[in-house]
Amino acid sequence: MKMEFPPWFLWGTATSAYQVEGGNYASDWWEWERRPGTPCAEPSGDACDHYHLYPQDLRLLASLGFNTYRFSIEWSRVEPEQDDYSRASLEHYRRVLEASHQHGLTPIVTFHHFTNPRWFTRSGGWERPDAPDRFARYCEVAARHLGDLIPIACTINEPNMPALLGYADALFPPGRNDHAARLRVTDAFLRGHLLARDVIKNETASTRVGLALSMADWHVVDEGSEQLEAIRRLREDVFLDGTAGDDFIGVNTYTRHRVGPAGFLPPETGVEVTLLGYEFYPQSLEATIRRAATTTALPVIVTENGIGTDDDARRIAFVEGALGGVHRCLTDGIDVQGYCYWSTFDNFEWNYGYIPTFGLIAVDRRTQVRSPKPSAAWLGRVARRGVLEPYLGSATSS
Ligand code: BGC
């Protein structure tokens, strides 16, 4: 069936600074990925050298057919030492924003995507009593310099994930397993979001501000509903509640979770799983959009949806399934304003290193040569035409 999307729909791809720029020496992740004993497969190094190659990257995205580009500003470049702001870094991001606009790519700018400056993490990170204020101060400086070029801003990407992965699972810095700390940090992120939203809007009232939340479709198994509610409350609901007064809610969705009376259950035997071991479950996006829209009553932007796979035909099948759900939401009158595929490139996937390939565009890390995959041509064509048709096995960008 042919599905038509509205002409104003935002069709984008997404990156985060640390995962693509390379050379983010002042970031806490640079230290973390080198520290003995941390669960990191390999260091990020030059990543995709997007810091230098952004002009050709933006040109490529526009030529593929996209009209939106979501990327993040690296706090540790803008404020490499406390209160020491780098005008050169701010100018760099201004050039990225200008190039986005020149190429007809609406920028969606994230101010915090998992990484912090080293000085911040070394001095207590999000447990510092003044953490939300420190973060908001950086946002204020960045918004003053860049805000006129930012139509849409996400204050914090998935605050629920560093709270979980850094303070319960010990997979992200600071590598803790401390429930009380996780709760404190959750509050700090929520406060940081509100302060950041206010300072950004104070600098440029026209910038629409929200946050991007990691959301899954939740399935109860047997008598697991109490467990599910408890897990979801801390993973999603407190953050959804924290978006009151925002301009939109950013939804990041990859899979579904199954929860029984004893907690999380693995995917059922025999189901298809992705390179990260998640269940291949594109239907999850429709469920999370509906839940986000109902719970918050805000417009929704899909700020991330994607799949880590080395089979590009499965990537197309995944996105096709997910977009079908987006279209059903639109048909039902839900205000879904855009879809950003994660990720633009095969990039640095945090503690997994470069193995899980989420990208529409492959990158040879020795030569930095970019090679768009068939999925890039296919999704770019959907974006350019605003029409989703069943994929018949070949993709061209025309
Ligand atoms: C994050 C990305 C990450 C992606 C795939 C999201 O949770 O925002 O940084 O690469 O998931 O795992």
Image (tube, helix red, strand yellow):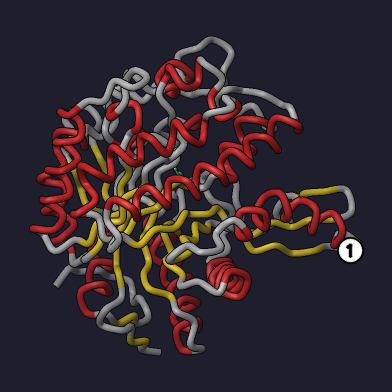
Quarter of the figure with residue 129: top right
- Give coordinates of residue 338: x percent, y percent: 36, 70
Q: Can residue 207 be seen in this view?
A: yes
Q: In this view, does 86 lie to the left or right of 286?
A: left
Instruction: Point out residue 159 in the picture as x, y percentages from the top left corner.
Output: 54, 44
At a point 44% along the width and 35% down the height, the residue shown is 135
Of residues 226 and 127, the one nearer the viewer is 127
x and y percent of residue 310 in the render? 41, 48
Q: Residue under circle 1?
A: 222
The residue sitting at the front extreme is: 202
Q: Is mark 1 on a helix, strand or loop?
A: loop
At x 20%, y 74%, the residue is 384
- Is 292 located above or below residue 204 in the figure? below
Taking 316 as reference, is 121 above or below it?
A: above
Give how far across and how far down residue 115 sits, in percent: 43, 31
Quadrant in the picture for the C terminus:
bottom left
Relative to 230, 28 lies left or right: left
Judged from this view, the residue extending furthest toward the top is 36
